[in-house]
Image (cartoon, rainbow, N blue to C red):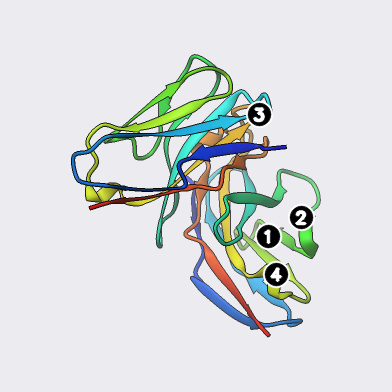
Amino acid sequence: AQSVTQLDSQVPVFEEAPVELRCNYSSSVSVYLFWYVQYPNQGLQLLLKYLSGSTLVKGINGFEAEFNKSQTSFHLRKPSVHISDTAEYFCAVSVSGGATNKLIFGTGTLLAVQP
Amino acid sequence: NAGVTQTPKFQVLKTGQSMTLQCAQDMNHNSMYWYRQDPGMGLRLIYYSASEGTTDKGEVPNGYNVSRLNKREFSLRLESAAPSQTSVYFCASSEGPLTNEKLFFGSGTQLSVL
């Protein structure tokens, strides 16, 4: 079975600083990986996804993530954050080609951007 | 473009009361889902409907029932609410049932059971 770990429950960062949100997964088969973002009082929306191909995936709002199979990681990065990036970020994993009912979400990381 | 619409946004129930959470999508999606979000636990799937006319249990179905009323609408019913069902509930939809299809979420229902 797959699992996903987001070790950091909260990441405080100053505006215009770089940020990395960590995500590690466990699986014995090939996987799809996702990052979703939840702005205050809103539902989740897809930030980016890795299905296959290039290990560096670019998403919306200047975020990118790198799939590292040897380290079983899919860390999310942004070189310079804005106040508006304050939100909760969820990593998710599924088996490649699998069904959404088997999608596993992490516990979330709250990114708190301070002026 | 409304996307996924959930009602109500907030609800307070007493233990033992029943209620139905409504969800509708206007994207002609085949698959719909109900999740609950609890602090420190991420999102957990309650029930899903891979296509119109089908429903199946997810990870945490106990205490809930669902109805896929038509292609647009997917409701979640709590027959006898318990304090353990205090949570934020999200409805979501996708074009198809596979994970390469993007999930679209509603804005959530905050439910408190006293």
Q: Nearer the viewer, residue B58 or B53?
A: B53
Residue type, mark 2 in image: Thr
In the rendered view, does A18 fall on the left or right side of B96? right
**Is residue A23 visible from the viewing direction of this image?**
no
Disc 4 is placed on an element classified as helix
Percent position of residue A30, x then y? 62, 43
In the rendered view, does A82 fall on the left or right side of B112? right
Disc 2 is placed on an element classified as loop
The chain ID associated with circle 2 is A
Percent position of residue A79, x then y? 78, 75
Q: Are marks 3 and 1 on the same chain?
A: no
Percent position of residue B70, x then y? 53, 17
Residue type, mark 4 in image: Ser
Q: Nearer the viewer, residue A105 or A51?
A: A105
In the rendered view, does B61 fall on the left or right side of A14? left
Residue receiving disc 2: A55
Give the vertical position of B5 relative to A58 (above or below).
above
**Which mark lies nearer to you, 2 or 4?**
4
Q: Are marks 2 and 3 on the same chain?
A: no
Residue type, mark 3 in image: Asp
Residue receiving disc 4: A84
Quarter of the rendering occupied by the N terminus of chain A? top left
Q: Residues within 10 Å of mark 4 (few under 14, many from 20)?
A: few
Mark 2 and mark 1 in contact? Answer it, CB < 8 Å: yes
**Which mark lies nearer to you, 1 or 4?**
4
Q: CA distance from mark 2 to mark 4?
A: 27 Å
Residue receiving disc 1: A68
Circle number at residue A86: none
Residue type, mark 1 in image: Asn
